[in-house]
Structures are given as C-alpha cells and as structure tokens.
C-alpha cells in the first residue's frame, strides 16, 4: 500500500475533489509524493491549500490553472481597467500582478513543496477525452514568464518543505555584554554617493529602476502588491500592514541632477497604455511639457462619444499629435463602434476620428489599429473550433478593421504620390 501511494502520480479534476479525498483518506494522503490537480479560477483555492497541508510527504505538484482568468477577475472599470477577454500576450506585467489577489493566494504562497509546476487544465476539469484535453492545453495554463512562474512557484519551492517540523527554542542563552570590537560589530555603513559614479553607470541604474517590461498604465491607484489576496475583502482588511510601496518615480525628486538625467529614461524608454481616454487626458494635464517631449509609445483604448458637432476622439488624437517625439501609437477600437460599422456599407462610411488617424500616419508615426474582441476570437478559434458559431459576426468585425487599415495605408501612399508630384514641379521650375 505504501508503494502504491508513494510511487504513483494521482490526479484530481478539481480542488474540492482533492480536499475531500485527503480529508477521508488522511493516512493515505501522508504517503502521496506526486499529484496533479486543476484549480478552476472561480472556485476556492483554499481547498487545494487544505489538501496540501494533509499531504505531509508531498514532493511534486502539477497544478492546472488559467492565469489569464485569474487576472480577468480583477479587471474592473472602477479600478481603471477594461473588463474584457484577453490573450496571454495582452496581459502586461502590470496587469499580471492582479493574479496575486486571487482568493487564498497569500496562503498558497506560504506553503512549501520541493517542486511545483503550473500547467494548463490537463487533469480532468475540462473533460477527459483527448480532444478536450488538447483544447484545454492550448487555451489555458500559466502566462509564460508570468507571476505564477516567476514569483509564486519560487516561493512555494523555498525550504522548509511541507511537513517539516519547526524547532522551538526552549531556553534563551544568556549573552555577555561585550565592547563593539570584541563583539565583532562593524562600523556604521557610510552613504554611497551615486553621483560620483560615471554617467554610463548611473544611466544603467536609472534604467534598472525606471524602465519596466511592458506598457505602463499611469494612475494614482494603490500598488497591487499592497492588496491582500481576496475578491470580497472589507475595507478594514483590504490592504497589507504598513505603508504602501512608493513609486519608483520618487527617484526623480532626489535632486536636480538626478531629475535631469533620469526623466528622459522613464518617459522615453517606457510605453504607456490608457484604458480610457480620460486617463490619457488627466495624465497629459498632470505632467510638464518637458516630460511630454520624451514620450514615444502610447496605446489608447478608443472610446467614441460626440458632444455637439465634435467627436471626442478628435480631441484625444489632437492631444496625442502634440507629443513632439511620439513614434508609435496603437488604437484599440471600441466594440460598439466596430459593431455599428459592421452593418454599414458604402464608400463614404468612415470611423469617427479617421481623418486624424490618416494625418497621424502620414506624419511618420507608426499607427496600429486593432479590436480586442476580434483578436481574442481568432486566437481562440485557432485553438478551439467550438467557438465557431460567432465566426460570421467576428469576420465582419475583422473586415471593418482591415478596411480601416487599408484606407490609412492608401492615404500614406497618396501623400507620397502628392509629394513626388511637387518634387517634379519644383524640378521643372529649376530648368526655366
């Protein structure tokens, strides 16, 4: 019996199945060495945690998970995010931190197992047929390089292992008072003067502190890492103890020299994403003209609203055109607008703000337009044919985006042809 439980790998389709089995088979649970279990994003992670605690001999865990869904749970409008479906590549490192707020995630991170691997849902929660497992393996799982792999897994695999008893000190040894030199006390550490370093070394430090992987959504939100894990926490227990972490931008307040050397690195080397146009406008109002001149890459989630005879998107695009060093602009077109244009026909049908989009593209800024729902649908369709019934609707939406891209591209070519004609005229005038 011991060999049977210790040498085989046991699979559980759901966390509650794992928790119930370990509850009713406590002695056998102590013998388990390898398990696989799926954590469904809308269930209790606490079930898996309780099962872990009963498996005192556990050495290896494969946990099926859908990290994108963990993140999506906290994509709420009131927090300044877009509550939409996303692909793994759409989850920025900043958004990915939201996965750490899943129910009972703090307790899971305190458990210790020698080896844990996060996998797609391959342990039976999505079905047991080869086709169901194949679809789950392509549409679920951890985000490559995400916080589950780089933070949670590393914490769980730290010593001590599950079941290792903690030794308690029963007596406190009496310490003799010694002088500083006899006790081996080092002299106080002298402050390090960063400005004494060569400029190249200082810039490397600034980049390490200020340049982040993936786009940044500027906001005054409390940092995600200061929240406790849980979806329905009261305000009294919502945050961790102690002050919230400071922004890395505090570095710019050190002194004038540090500010002048580092400000361009933060605003020029990072990309910025705004999930609502008002986020963009408040950001541009809040920062100085000096900081604006460094901004090169922006993503704006396009929302259309008209007031009087003015489309609000024109206001936002003009504000972006005033960024003197802007090199790349990505516009994520609103589903409502795409839906309206899907049923519209004729050569005169145009997207609100389209004329300014063409002007932006002709100015040399790299312009990318896309629709989130279209991108997610066709990503899923490649991996799960069962989403096919919406194909007609989504192909129409994709055509709207493709036609818009083509009109923008053609406007650039027409501008080039116009410039060529001007060159010919100037050349002819030179001969007379």
Image (tube, grey):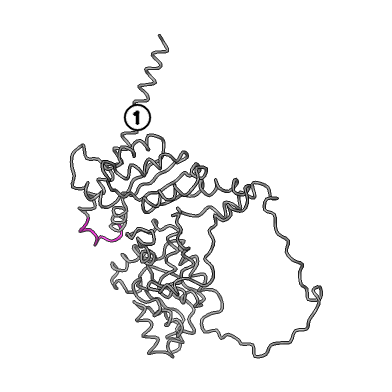
Residue at the limit of the structure toward the top, as seen here: 432
* Element type where label 1 sits in the image: helix
205 horizontally vs 111: left or right: right
Residue that mark 1 sits on:
415
Q: Residues within 10 Å of mark 1 (few under 14, many from 20)?
A: some
Residue situated in front as seen by the camera: 12 or 96: 96
**In this view, which residue lies farthest toward the front?**
308
Choose top left, top right, bottom left or bottom right for residue 70: bottom left
Q: Between 198 and 38, which is closer to the camera in this rendering?
A: 198
Q: Give the residue at x 78% y 73%.
A: 184
Residue stretch in magenta: 382-390
Q: Is residue 211 above or below residue 106?
A: above
**Above or below, comparing residue 258 to residue 429 in the picture:** below
Whether residue 111 is situated above or below residue 401 in the rendered picture: below
The part of the image, by quadrant, that contains residue 9 is bottom left
Q: Quadrant of the N terminus?
A: bottom left
Question: Where residue 122 sits in the image (x, y, percent)?
Answer: 35, 71
Q: Is residue 87 left or right of residue 187?
A: left
Q: Main secondary structure of the magenta part?
A: helix
Residue at 44% across, 79% down = 34
In-front residue for pair 302/327: 302
Residue name at image x 76 percent, y 72 percent: 185
Residue at 42% across, 13% down: 430
Q: Can you give x and y, in whole percent of width and height, for residue 62 in the image? A: 43, 73
The percent coordinates of residue 138 (x first, y second) are 34, 62
Indicate yes or no whether the magenta region holds residue 110: no
Above or below: residue 48 compared with residue 381: below
């Amino acid at each position: 019996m011991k060999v049977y439980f210790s040498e085989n790998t046991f699979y559980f389709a759901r966390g509650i199945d794992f928790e119930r089995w370990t509850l009713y088979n406590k002695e056998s649970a102590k013998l388990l060495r390898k398990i696989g279990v799926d954590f469904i994003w809308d269930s209790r992670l606490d079930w898996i945690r309780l099962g872990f605690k009963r498996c005192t001999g556990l050495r290896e865990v494969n946990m099926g998970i859908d990290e994108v869904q963990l993140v999506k749970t906290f994509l709420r409008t009131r927090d300044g995010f877009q509550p939409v479906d996303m692909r793994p590549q759409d989850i920025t490192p900043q958004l990915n931190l939201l996965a750490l707020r899943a129910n009972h995630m703090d307790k899971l991170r305190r458990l210790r197992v020698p080896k844990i691997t996060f996998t797609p849902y391959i342990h039976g929660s999505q079905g047991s047929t080869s086709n169901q497992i194949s679809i789950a393996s392509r549409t679920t799982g951890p985000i490559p390089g995400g916080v589950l792999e780089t933070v949670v897994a590393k914490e769980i695999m730290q010593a001590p292992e599950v079941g290792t008893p903690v030794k308690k000190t029963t007596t406190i040894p009496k310490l003799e008072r010694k002088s500083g030199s006899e006790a081996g006390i080092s002299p106080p550490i002298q402050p390090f003067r960063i400005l004494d370093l060569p400029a190249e070394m200082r810039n490397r430090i600034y980049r390490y502190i200020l340049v982040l992987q993936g786009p940044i959504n500027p906001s005054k939100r409390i940092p995600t890492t200061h929240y406790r894990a849980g979806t329905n926490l009261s305000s009294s227990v919502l945050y961790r103890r102690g002050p919230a972490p400071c922004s890395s931008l505090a570095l710019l307040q050190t002194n004038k020299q540090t500010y002048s050397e580092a400000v361009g690195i933060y605003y020029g080397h990072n990309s910025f994403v705004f999930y609502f146009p008002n986020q963009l406008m408040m950001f541009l109002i809040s920062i100085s003209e000096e900081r604006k001149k460094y901004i090169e890459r922006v993503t704006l989630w396009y929302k259309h609203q008209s007031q009087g005879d003015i489309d609000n998107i024109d206001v936002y695009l003009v504000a972006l055109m005033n960024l003197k060093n802007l090199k790349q602009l990505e516009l994520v077109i609103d589903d409502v607008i795409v839906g309206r244009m899907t049923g519209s026909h004729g050569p005169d049908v145009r997207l609100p703000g389209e004329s300014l989009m063409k002007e932006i593209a002709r100015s040399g800024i790299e312009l990318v337009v896309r629709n989130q729902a279209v991108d997610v649908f066709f990503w899923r369709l490649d991996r799960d044919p069962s989403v096919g019934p919406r194909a007609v609707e989504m192909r129409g939406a994709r055509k709207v985006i493709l036609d818009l891209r083509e009109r923008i591209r053609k406007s650039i070519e027409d501008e080039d042809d116009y410039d060529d004609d001007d060159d010919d005229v100037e050349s002819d005038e030179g001969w007379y």
